[in-house]
Each structure stands twice: as structure tokens, then as C-alpha cells.
Image (cartoon, rainbow, N blue to C red):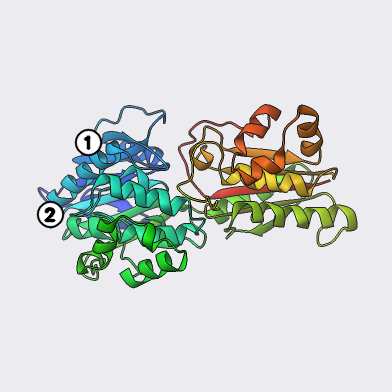
Amino acid sequence: MVALTENGISVAGVDYDLGPGAKLVVLGAGKATLPIAEALEGVLGDRIDAGAVVLRRGEITTTLRHIDVFVADHPLPTRASVDGALELERLANQAGPGDLVLACFTGGSSALASLPPEGITFEDKRRLHEILLGSGMPIAEVNTVRKHVSAIKGGRLAERIAPARIINLNISDVAGDVLDVLTDLTVADTSTVADAISILEDYGLWDQLPASIRGHLNSPKAESPDLESVEITTELLVTGIGVCEAMAEEAKARGYTPVILTTTLEGEAREMGRFIASLCLSSSTSSYPFAPGTVLVGCGSENSVAIAGKGAFGDGGPGQEAALAAAMEIDGAQIVTLFMDTDGSDGGTDAAGAVADGQTVRRATETGLDLRKALMNHSAMEPFEQLGDLILTGATGTNVNDLSVAVIG
């Protein structure tokens, strides 16, 4: 994909010349950014003149020789997120004609590199993230709002990088691989401020926003820049479709019949869990729509969880909630389901997700666990932790979509 050439570098078979004095800079943030940065250093070495990446706290990092590493937090931004964003902004401002910027922004960058626009405090920006993440809206709509309340998102970092050239190297964690949803700092924004305000009003969130954010959205400063004159190229390194195909091949190798159910799974987590469980239950009892022995695989954008009021983060996640809802549907059946986040952290917890099968409800009852109460309280982690059914991977260094697997016995 990336290689050194006599006059510069090559990306996906296309040569990019770097003339005398031209700089090669690496910028990035996200849960799958570290392995991209490591690979770039391994290939390009001393040809990298400067760089900075913002990684999730707790992620195991190796020493990067030419790229500075900043550590911040997810799913809610902290002051460290601002520090990392300021360094990205500084390096972007230094890029000039003839320079080339390799941008590796992956899932989670909205929290890891968060820079409020002028007139909005960090506290107000963080409150916006809390409101959005607790609303249950799809990630595309969350990002539509966040892009218009930022000093670097919505293509604003690309505007600062210009007139230097930009090559995006991305791993897609978004259903449909929509570029300005998966890497909105360095591609043109296709949404408008009117879209953002409409979303907030439709979800009944406008009046919950801090006054500074409402004022900003009602000003011209909230509109995203026009990037028509900026030279931007985007290459997707991994997509959800590729992951589903790999899972299907593994299922086939184990003697099952794989079916790729969807590559655009998205919605309220518990409803996604119930939907997949209902397909499995019908198939298990009546062989319709799938025969027993089938493995359903699917992936898509991060499923959502609607939390009343301010909400709480850390006692569950969309994957665990989907698994809990599925468990209550498949009670007693010969079915196993798995729901997980490929980054290793479902909803900001230490678990990647959870497994549920036809015996989960019985085992929970024998242990004195109230699964319905846990589902209503959005505290899915506790029962799965007590049952030993959490998926614990640690930080995986990738973020390719949420995954679901269901085995129909």
C-alpha cells in the first residue's frame, strides 16, 4: 500500500513526489491509529519529518521514533484530548506547498482529539458529548452534530493543512464506509449546520444544550469549510465487508454454513439483539429462514443505547446490551450469540462484548441475577461478569465495526 520511491512515496500504486525541502508529516487519532503509524514508520523510517497521533489511554504503545504520541480518553473527551488536538492543529498549520500529510484518523477520534471552537469551554463541549452519547441516535447523526461544534472536525483540520496534499489511510468502522463519518477531520463535510440543528430538535435535545453551543450553532462559524481546492485522497485499508467475509470463511472451515446477514447493522442495541435472536429462534425451531447448522455473521456501525437524563458510562455497552436482550429471547434454545466491539472496549468498558446462549437465563436465575432489571438499567456488564461470559481482549489496536455472530444449533 505504502512504499518509498526515488522521488518521494507511493500509495496504492500512485507516486507522490516530494521535492527539495518538502516535508512528509503523519497525523492521526483513534483506536486503530497505532498500528497504521507503526507500519508507516517501518516502511518510511527517516523520511517522516514530523508527526503526532492521539491514542486511547491504556493502549499498549511501542516507541515511535518520528511520530509523537499523545494519550487521551474515550468515549468522553478529557483535557488530554484537547492537548492532543492542539498538537495536531499546530503541525497542520506548519504544512506548506509541496508537503504531504498522511492522515490516519480512525474510530474514536472525536473523543480522543477534541478541540472546542472559540467561545465554547471544554466543559460545555464535554457536556455535548454526554448528551449525544446518551441520546440513542445513530453514530452518523452524532457525528453530524459534533462536526459543527469543533475547531478541527468537519474538514477544518484539512483546511489548516492546505495547500499541502492529504492522503487519508483509514480503517472503516462505519456502515457504508461514509468518508465524512469515519474521518471527518480531513475530508469534506457533506452535512450542514441546519442538519445538526434539525437532529438536535428532532431528538428533543436543543434545550438541553449549554447556551454557548446553541449560540455557536446559530452563527456562521459553525458551517464547515469548502475543501474543493484541497488535494485529498482517501484509501480504505480494512472495511467491515472484509471482516464479515473472513468470519464466514472461518465458520465454513469449522463445518458450518455461513450467512453474511448484514454489513450495515445499526440501531438501538437491545432491538438489534432481539432481531437477530428472533431470526435464530425461528430457524432453530422451524428451519426458516435458515437451517440449523447455520452461522449468521454481521457487522455495522456502533449500535446505540438511549439513556434517560445525563446517563452513566462504564457499566455496560451496546454489545453487552444486545447480548442480554438476545439471551432473554433464546432461553432454552440451541443457539449461541456473540456481540462485540472490535476495538476491545464496548461502551468504554474493559470488555469487548459478551456471549449469550440458551442457558444464560437459567444460569442467571440460579445465581439470583435479574436480567430484565439489568437490561432496563443499562447495566449489562454485571450479570455477564458474574456468569463469566464477557469477552475480554484488551485493546486490540483496531476498530473495524461492531460484530455479531449467531450459531443456530
Q: Is mark 1 on a helix, strand or loop?
A: helix
Q: Where is residue 223 in the image (x, y as percent from the top left)?
A: 25, 67
Displayed quadrant of residue 40: top left
Task: Please tell me which residue is depicted at 41% across the width and 46% down the height of the picture.
Answer: 108
Q: Where is residue 306 in the image (x, y as percent from the top left)?
A: 54, 53
In the image, 185 versus 220, the foreground residue is 220
Q: Position of residue 136 (x, y in %)?
A: 52, 56
Q: Assess whether mark 2 and mark 1 are in contact (beta carbons under 8 angstroms).
A: no
Q: Residues within 10 Å of mark 2 (few under 14, many from 20)?
A: some
Q: Is mark 2 on a helix, strand or loop?
A: loop
Mark nearest the camera among 1 and 2 is 2
In the image, 282 versus 328, the foreground residue is 328
In the image, 345 versus 293, the foreground residue is 345
Displayed quadrant of residue 289: bottom right
Amino acid of disc 2: Gly
Q: Can residue 171 be seen in this view?
A: no
Q: From mark 1 to mark 2, how far is it between C-alphas?
A: 19 Å
Q: Can residue 86 be seen in this view?
A: yes
Task: Please tell me which residue is depicted at 60% across the width and 45% down the height of the picture.
Answer: 319
Report the residue marked by disc 1: 46
Q: Position of residue 378 (x, y in %)?
A: 59, 43
Amino acid of disc 1: Asp
Above or below for 251 versus 15:
above
In the image, 160: left or right of 32? left
Report the residue marked by disc 2: 96
